[in-house]
Image (cartoon, coloured by chain):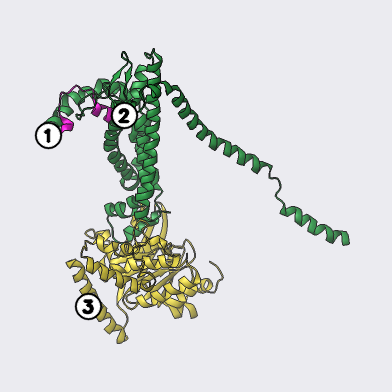
Amino acid sequence: MITATASIPESAQERMVAPSRFGDVIFRWLTLVMAFSVLVLVILVGWQLWRNSSLAIHKFGFHFLNTSKWDPVAEEFGALPFIYGTLISSLIALVIAVPLSIATAVFLTELAPMWIRQPLVSLIEMLAAIPSVILGLWGVFVMVPFLRLAVFPWLKKTLGFLPLFTGPIYGVSMLAGGIIVAIMILPIITSVSREILRSVPDLQREAAYGLGATRWEVTRIAVLSYAKNGLFGAVVLGLGRALGETMAVTMVIGNTPQIVASLFAPGYTLASVIANEFTEATTDVYLSALFEVGLVLFGVTIAVNLIAQLLVKTFVNTSAGAVQ
Amino acid sequence: MKNVMEHESTISADTAALHAMTDAEQSPAIAFEVNDLSVWYGQKQTIFNTTIDIPAQSVTAIIGPSGCGKSTFLRCLNRMHELVPTARHEGSIRLFGEDLYAPKIDPCVVRRRIGMVFQKSNPFPTMSIAENVIVGLRLNGVRDRAYLDERMEKALRMAALWDEVKNDLNRPGISLSGGQQQRLCIARAVAVEPEIILMDEPCSALDPIATAKVEELIYELKKQYTIVIVTHNMQQAGRCSDYTAFFYLGRLIEFAKTEKIFTNPSQKQTEDYITGRFG
C-alpha cells in the first residue's frame, strides 16, 4: 500500500520528463550548420574574389570604378562601361518585365477562368526552363534581325526626339540585351507574384466585393495594396537575376565597352566581359582585373538587394501599416 | 456625389414611411421576397426550394447547425455566392419588389445597396481607420473631402467606435483590437448607407464584451436598417432579433417571430435544435 502510493508520484515525475532531447539537439545543430553554411559560402566567394583581384585593386585603386578605358594590351582597365551596361540592361529588363509579370499574375489569380489557369502557369514555368544559351541563339537569329528591321526603325521614327532612341541601328544593342533579360526574368517575377497574390486572404476580396467593388476595384483596393510588399520582393528577386544574367545577354548586347545615351548602341555588362575574356587573360594584371569585375558585380548585386530591402522597410511599411 | 445625395433622400423618405407603418402596428413591409430558391455549388445542392419574406426595419436571425446552408442563403441575398465560380441558383429574390437577379441588374450595384459584415473582421490593412470607413464612398466616386469627413464621423458614431478612435483616425485599421476592428467593418458597411445590412456570424471571433457591444449596435442599427444576421449562438438570436429562421440541411424548417420560435416552435426539429437535443 505504502509502496504503491510512493510509486505514483515517481512515475508521474517520469512522465513530466521529455522522453529524449537527443533528437532535438541534433536537429537544432544540423539546421544551424546548414543555415550558416550559406553565409559562409557567400563570405568565402567574396573573400576569394577580393584576394584574386588584389593586384588590380592595388594598381588601379578607385580609378577602376570610374574610368572607361579597357585596354588589355596597354594593361589599362576601367570597369565603368560594364557597370553602366549591367545597370542599364537590368533597368530596361525591369521596365519591360515588371508590368508584364504583375499583370500576368493578376490575370492568373483574379481574372482567368479556372480551366485556363494551370496550363498558363505550366507554360510560364516552361519559359523558365529554357536554357540561357538557347534563348541567346533565338535572340541572335530571330529577335535581333526583327528588332533591326522592324522595331528599332519604328522607335526611331516615333520616339527619335529622345536621345535614347537616336544613332545608327546595328541590331545588337543595349536595348536588345535588356529585352532578352526581360524575357529571362519574366517567369520568376510572374510565379513569385502569383504566389503572393494567391496568399491574399479571400476575406480581403470579399470585403471589397461586399462594398460593391468591381473586379478591377477589388484587385486595386484589396489585392494589390495588400500584396505590395511581397510584389516589391518579387521585383527585387527578378532584379537580382537580371544583374547576373550572362549567356543570352552576351550574345545580343554587342560587347562594346562604351557609355552612350542611345539604347540602339551596343553595350557590355560585367558578367559578359568575364565570360568573354577570361580565357584570353594571359597576364596576371588582366586576370586580376577580371576578378575585380567579378567583385564589382558581386558588390553591385548585394548593394542593390540591400537598398531594395531598405526601401521596403522605410517606405512601404510605414505608409501601409504592418501587413500581417 | 449628386447620386449619393439623391439616394440618401429617397431612403429617408422610405424610412419615414416605414416608421409610420410600424407605429400604426400594421404588418411590416417586406424587404426580401425569396421565392422557391435553390442553390448548387457544382453538383452539390446546398439550398432547397426556400420561400421566405424577410421584413424591413427589423432584425432577422438565421440559425441552424453548421453546414445547413445559412451562410449560402445570406450570400444569395447580395449575390456574393456568385463569386464561387461553380455556383448556380434557381428561384427568385426580390428586394422591395425589384428582382435582384434580373439580367439588367449589376451585382456590384446590388452589393452597394446591401452591405455585408463578415465572420472575421477584415479591415483593409494598408488603409488607415478613416480610409477604411470611407473606402466605399470613394468607390462610389465621392471626392469632396468635407463631405467624406462628415460621413466618416457619422458612420463611426453609428458603429459606436467614434469616441474610441477619434484621435487616431490616421492609424492603420488593423492596429485596433478584434472587437474594434469588427465595429470598424460595420462602420465601413454603414458608411455607404446601404438599405440592408447582412451579417455573417459577426461575433463568432469576438470575446463576450465585444460581442455585447456589437449586439447593442445591432439594436441601434435596427432603427434605420433591415438586418439579416446569421448566428451560431442561439442566445444571440434570442437577444437581438425580431424574427428567426431555422435552417436544417439546406431547407427552411421554420420562420416566425423570435419569441414564438424560442417559446412555442411549431416544428419538432426546431424545438429539438433550440433545446439543444442536436446541432
Question: Measured from the top left, where is residue B212 in percent x and y?
Answer: 46, 74
Density class for disc 1 (Cα within 10 Å; few <14, some 14-19, many ≥20) is few
Distance of label 2 from label 1 (alpha carbons): 26 Å
Magenta range is A161-180
**Residue on which the image places disc 1:** A161
Q: Is residue A269 above or below residue B266?
A: above
- Which of discs 2 and 1 lies nearer the camera? The answer is 2
Whether marks 2 and 1 lie on the same chain? yes
Q: Which of A61 and A238 lies nearest the eye of the viewer?
A: A61
**Residue on which the image places disc 3:** B13
Q: Residue at x 36, y 36 (%)?
A: A238
Chain A on-screen colour: green
Which numbered disc, 2 or 1, marks the residue that appears first in the sequence? 2
| Image disc number at residue A83 | 2
- Secondary structure, mark 2, is helix
Q: Chain of mark 2?
A: A
Q: Name which residue type carries label 1.
A: Phe
Asked if marks 2 and 1 touch (Cβ < 8 Å), the reply is: no
Chain B on-screen colour: yellow
